[in-house]
Image: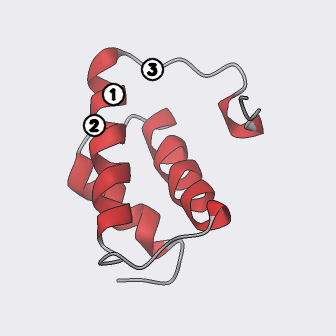
Amino acid sequence: MTTNLPFFDDVYFEPDATEAMGAAFEKACRSFNGVGQSDIIREIIAKGIIDLARNGERDPDHLCKEALKALGFD
């Protein structure tokens, strides 16, 4: 079963961008130190990373940091 995520519609990223985005997403999720995240938290993280990547950001650390800021973390 797949989930349709509306923020992925008509989005394409080069391999280097998807690698950076994946690394940022994993780092952001690990920052919760094993505390489970709900689907909505992971979705907010992913959306933040995607939005930044759409604007050209490719640094995984910066993508992670900015995505966590959207959740109120510094």
Rate crowding at label 1 as few (under 14), some (14 to 19) or many (20 or more) other CA atoms within 10 Å. Answer: some
Nearer to the camera, 53 or 39: 39
Tag 3 residue: 13
For the residues bearing labels 1 and 3, Cβ distance under 8 angstroms: yes
- Report x, y in % for residue 55: 47, 38
Whether residue 46 sits left or right of residue 17 in the image: it is: right
For the residues bearing labels 2 and 1, Cβ distance under 8 angstroms: yes
Whether residue 53 sits left or right of residue 23 in the image: it is: right
Nearer to the camera, 22 or 16: 22
Q: Residue at the spot x=53%, y=76% of the render?
A: 71
Q: Residue at the spot x=77%, y=32% of the render?
A: 4
Q: Residue at the spot x=72%, y=25% of the render?
A: 9
Residue 62 in view in this figure: yes
Tag 2 residue: 20
- Please tell me whether residue 57 is drawn above or below residue 19 in the rendered image: below
Looking at the rendered structure, the kind of residue marked 3 is: Phe
Which quadrant of the view contains residue 7?
top right
Disc 2 secondary structure class: helix
Looking at the rendered structure, the kind of residue marked 2 is: Ala
Looking at the rendered structure, the kind of residue marked 1 is: Ala
User: Mark 2 and mark 1: span between their CA atoms?
Assistant: 5 Å
Label count reads: 3
Rate crowding at label 3 as few (under 14), some (14 to 19) or many (20 or more) other CA atoms within 10 Å. Answer: few
Closer to the N terminus: mark 3 or mark 2? 3
Disc 1 secondary structure class: helix
- Please tell me whether residue 67 is drawn above or below residue 37 in the rendered image: above
Disc 3 secondary structure class: loop
Q: Residue at the spot x=27%, y=58% of the render?
A: 27
User: Mark 3 and mark 2: span between their CA atoms?
Assistant: 10 Å
- Report x, y in % for residue 37: 52, 70
On residue 44, the disc is none
Tag 1 residue: 17
